[in-house]
Image (cartoon, rainbow, N blue to C red):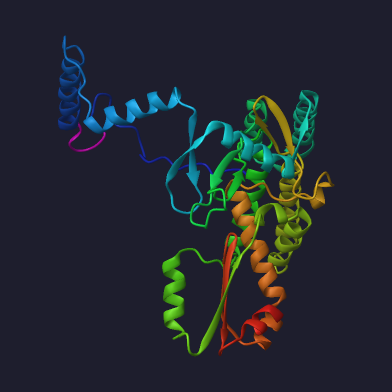
Amino acid sequence: MKGKMAGEASVLSEPPPKGASTFKGADELEKFLHHLERELLKMSFKDNEEIKTAPIDDRIRHFLDELKLSDYTVMHTDKTNSIMLVKIIDYIKHVNVHLKSSAKTIARQRINEFYEDSLCFLEKIQDKLSENENNHIKSAIESKQIATPKMLTKDHKDPDKNGDCKTGLVLPARNFTAGFSNVGHGGTKRILDKNKVKCQKHTIAHACHLKNELSRLGIKHRNSAAMSMDAEAVHPSIKFALVKKAVLHCAKKLSEDEMETIVFCLELIKFSMGSTTCMFQDKHCEHIGPEGDCEVEEKGLATGGNEAAFLADLVALHCFEMSEEMLTDIKTRCKGMCRDDGMIVFKGEKTKRDIIHF
């Protein structure tokens, strides 16, 4: 991961004469910029001239001002790319429910321990990092930033008997230890991309891609059976031990040096997963996963950030490839995952009992 950048060659073989234009048309460009600067200064110093705003801007500003004085807050939706208003007291209640199942309250001293451990770990590994990587991690640590969890509502699903939709918690990847995971994720992805490892071989990127694939295969309801999957809390259920197994599986054909770098990247990701914290209502929490306090190997991914999505895709690829023989025996025609949603299309008609047995 560490290396020196090649020096840049000089664009000009020799410097131009003093006062000469560096390229054709430079004089005209300089005159234009001078004229533009003069006009902008005239506009800036005009007296008694107010900046006009569009009516829509005034309505948005008025809405935000009113929202600050109300008992409601804004909550983003999970799939429909919109927002909805929810009472602040209900928002706090739902966030605390999620935190109770996936985090534990810790003292301020524990945060200080994470900070000191991060500095010690960085000093230990800095010889393996490039200057930019080292500066990125050090800058993240020195920021001492602790993320605030954000709740999403799954309004595309049916509400419960009280009219409430299911909710999910997102932990933004802005923790002060996230720099390690950023570098580990970047190094892993670059090596796999360089060796043309198809990390998203079974990833459904967009709905239109799935539609095109189904059309290409000539899949109809009379000659096929489709099974959809919707995993609950998919990221927290993906433990580091499984992430490590999936990454090493994808890197099994790499050179010895590249494999050594992959193992190092996994150590960086492991450190971040073992020290993920958040803060809500002046309380510090440590991410522990749905199964309670455990070793780092058994901790799950925190939902939020490109790293979690990329590693989840690798785990999905690993699971599909490990079950390739079984899926071939039962004659599957198409399969894929998109985060917590998945689909398998079987050849021929299947009964409900067949699907349950599968």
Residue drawn at x 65%, y 85% is 328
Q: Residue at x 35, y 36 (%)?
A: 14
Residue, x 48% and y 31% (percent of image)?
A: 72
- Which x, y percent locates residue 102? 73, 44
* Image: magenta residue range: 22-26
Question: Is 234 on the left-hand or right-hand side of 226?
Answer: right
Q: Quadrant of residue 42?
A: top left
Q: Position of residue 170 (x, y in %)?
A: 60, 44
In the picture, measured across the screen, residue 47 lies left or right of residue 178, that is: left
Q: Quadrant of residue 121?
A: top right
Q: Is residue 18 visible?
A: yes
Please name whichever residue, 337 or 72, is drawn nearer the observer in this view of the structure: 72
Q: Looking at the picture, does residue 229 appear above or below residue 214?
A: above
Q: Residue furthest top?
A: 47
- Determine whether, in the image, residue 73 is placed left or right of residue 337: left
Q: Quadrant of the C terminus?
A: bottom right
Q: Nearer the viewer, residue 52 or 75?
A: 75
